[in-house]
Image (tube, rainbow, N blue to C red):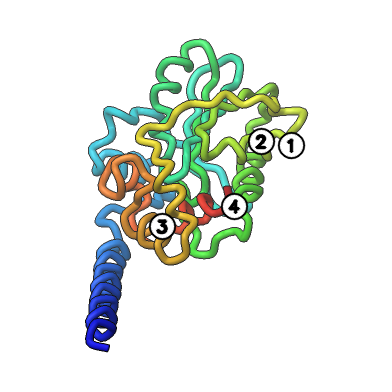
Amino acid sequence: MRALGVTLAVVFGVALLAYAAGLGIYAVASTKPPVSTQPRSVEEARLVVERMGLAEAYPFEHRFVLTPHGRMHFVDEGQGPVLLCLHGNGSWSLECAEVLRTKSAESRVLAPDLVGFGLSEKPASLAYDPIPAHAQDLSVLVEILDLHDVQVIASASSASIAIELARLEPERVRSSVIHQDPPGDSPVAARLARAPVLGEVVVQGLGALSPGYARGPFGRVQGSWDERASSLALARAE
């Protein structure tokens, strides 16, 4: 009986410590970021990038379009055959900076921030099924810009969105997808994201799906617990 009592006391103590740690992570992660990451204009977007010290890494012109699920930020550089670069989960169009630099000399390169990510709007209410929702938003972008013969470059975690977009826009978007390796991809974090409670702590609390975690140049643009809900929803939909 004494051994059982000690075991129960240890289990209770560990559970209490885990609960306290979870509360601490939530308290820190739910704090609003010092710089708003939901700009409403080109000027505000430029200011956000400058305040984050990313102006040199992300020197592109900011654009916005209104989609069914929120205001979408995107970059549109160059002329020629159209390439659509889709960032991965926990990331944003900064991931496409190298593609924008190297390909825009001979192609028209678009790099949007999916709604809920980057400099796009982070809605308080998320779509029930994020993959079709993101594809619908991209469909609006493709139609408004009247794009044709679009070749998609996508990270592994956004490939399903690219496939759905091609299904929605068969006359505008190629069904083939070029895959690129995202920086700091973490398959372990993606698996943990699917676990109840643990997923919230790892993704929304620590920003584990973002290269560099919550404090890195990718994670800071999803600057709080609530803003990283989009990452968790997409991870659980894959």
Q: Residue at x 54, y 20 (%)?
A: 108
Q: Is residue 152 left or right of residue 1?
A: right
The image's mark for residue 215 is none
Q: Is residue 230 left or right of residue 147?
A: left
Q: Amino acid at mark 2?
A: Ile
The image's mark for residue 227 is 3
Q: Amino acid at mark 3?
A: Glu
Q: Amino acid at mark 4?
A: Pro
- Give the residue number, with chain letter if any, for mark 4: 130
Q: Is residue 36 above or below residue 96?
A: below
Mark found first going from the N terminus, 4 or 3: 4
- Count neighbours of disc 2 (C-alpha within 10 A) and say few if under 14, some if 14 to 19, many if 20 or more: many
SS class, disc 3: loop
- Count neighbours of disc 4 (C-alpha within 10 A) and say few if under 14, some if 14 to 19, many if 20 or more: many
Mark found first going from the N terminus, 1 or 4: 4
- Label 1 to label 3, Cα distance in Å? 28 Å
- Label 1 to label 4, Cα distance in Å? 16 Å
- Label 2 to label 4, Cα distance in Å? 13 Å
Q: Residue at x 72, y 28 (%)?
A: 172
